[in-house]
Amino acid sequence: MRGSEQGHGRDDRPLSAESAWRLTADRADECVLFFDFDGTLAPVEDDPTSVRPVPRALAAISALAAVVRRVAIVSARPVDFLRDRFHGAADVDLYGLYGLEQSHGAGPTVTEPAALPWVPAMADLAERARAELPPEILVEYKRLSVALHYRTAPELAGEVERWGGAEAERLGLKVQVGRMVLELKPPVDRDKGLVIGEAVASAGCAWYFGDDVSDLKAFAALRDREERDPSFFGVCVAVANPETGQAVAGAADLTFDSPEALGDFLGKAAAALR
Ligand SMILES: O=P(O)(O)OC[C@H]1O[C@H](O[C@H]2O[C@H](CO)[C@@H](O)[C@H](O)[C@H]2O)[C@H](O)[C@@H](O)[C@@H]1O
């Protein structure tokens, strides 16, 4: 685990993981913990369908949900996928598709109404991507977005960017880049920053754990909350990786080397609060 060089202008920075957790323990009942999924709680693999959270992180999340105000997963995956991966962790909020879907505890999945008319267009887009892009590109259809993966064929990144850019312009879609992936989404105003901004409005403390560029907006939402209320305690945590790791670690207070290292920290953190 590494502390960031950045002080972010507060007296309590730079932080060590231990001191940050001690400050959290003092206000656990007003603290929300937000976790990105891929690359943060789960190691990155070639096949997005086979990915699972590291066991220690999964166990820690259930334990933490019992001792802090809320635990939430904030991901580009659909809520159904997250529910499957976290089915043992009952009292966890799930924000899927960058907040276009959400479910709280055992409640139903609620979809952002403005996004619903885009379902047929996204299904059609996925079909055309399969027909028009080289077979090495893995097309992941997620009902309200389409992810074009080039992890196993990085030389095709340019072709994916050109095809995706042209389709985004033609259909009026948003483009989200990520780790060896380009994603096309409806032009609806939801992202991880907006999700976190709303969810921390009444919290006194929050941590956000992420590894990818879409997580930077979530970090910014915590920084913004801190700036408006200096008594708010926000901690931004990066998980290192060779693709986006530098940018994310540069904006974080703390960096863990891998999802496994994060799982180890969370296990100890949960035990310390019990
Ligand atoms: O917001 P997240 O939970 O971090 O989701 C971001 C993307 O994650 C997945 O793709 C990434 O992980 C895959 C599995 O390890 C990997 O093969 C791929 O290269 C990564 O970009 C997911 O499949 C995407 O839909 C998400 O956008």
Image (tube, rainbow, N blue to C red):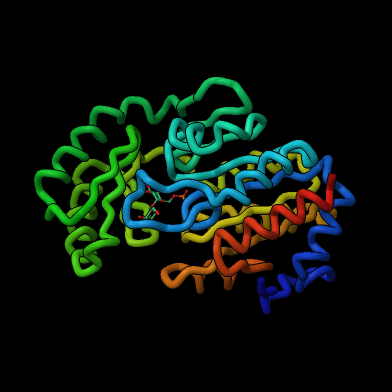
Residue 229: image location, x then y, percent: 79, 52
In-front residue for pair 46/219:
46
Residue drawn where x is 72% and y is 38% of the image? 65
Vertical arrangement, residue 27 with respect to residue 156, above or below: above
Report which quarter residue 251 is drawn in.
bottom right
| Number of on-image labels | 0
Q: The N terminus lies in which quarter of the figure? A: bottom right
Q: Residue at x 62, y 34 (%)?
A: 89
> Residue pushed farthest top?
108
Lateral position of residue 5 relative to residue 245, left or right? right
Is 127 on the left-hand or right-hand side of 1? left
What residue lies at 44% left-to-right and 45% top-to-bottom? 76
Quick check: 186 above or below 256?
A: above
**Extreme residue in the bottom direction:** 5
List x then y, in percent, for residue 105. 63, 27
Of the 4 image quadrants, the one containing the C terminus is: top right
Q: Residue furthest front?
A: 55
Which one is nearer the viewer's eye here, 54 or 9? 54
124 to the left or right of 190:
left
From the top left corner, tell me how far across and down residue 137 is, in percent.
20, 54
Q: Position of residue 66 (x, y in %)?
A: 76, 36
